[in-house]
Amino acid sequence: MNLVREYKQMEETFDLEIVDNGCEARNVLIIKNNEDTACIEGVYEIVSKTCEENCLILTLKTGDYYSHENIKTYTVVIDEGKN
């Protein structure tokens, strides 16, 4: 499951902490994109952000310039019930 403990937004970057993966890494996203699960490390520019119930829909710039390959949209599921 994709459970994000918390997120912080600062200016044009964001930082999501890891959830149930058994390690203490930082600056890692646990994302759900369609039916696939993936991890992406790093800090990215937010192009747009939409808040929905228990999730964020983020459009991110993952490279140095705007192109189809660098703009990705992810649904980040937030589990606020986890400690």
Image: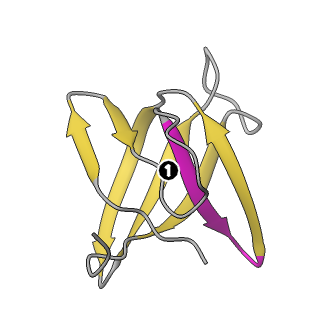
Task: Specify the farthest residue to the front.
Answer: 22
Q: Secondary structure at mark 1?
A: strand
- Image quarter where the C terminus lies is bottom left
Residue occupying the point 61% across, 78% down = 1
Q: Quadrant of residue 42?
A: top right
Residue 6 lies within the magenta run = no
**Quadrant of the rendered image containing residue 65:** top right
* Residue that mark 1 sits on: 59
Q: Residue at x 37, y 71 (%)?
A: 78
Which amino acid lies under the numbered mark 1 shown in the image of this protein?
Answer: Thr
Is 34 contained in the magenta span? yes
The image quadrant that residue 67 belongs to is top right
Q: Which residues are magenta?
A: 28-35
> What residue do we see at 57% from left, 56% from top?
30
The image shows residue 82, relative to residue 66, as above or below, that is below
- What secondary structure predominates along the stretch shown in magenta? strand
Give coordinates of residue 59: x percent, y percent.
50, 50
Q: Is residue 65 left or right of residue 8?
A: right
- The location of residue 33, given as percent across then percent down, is 68, 67
x and y, in percent, of residue 3 in the image: 47, 70
Asked if residue 4 is positioned above or below residue 64 in the image, the reply reads below
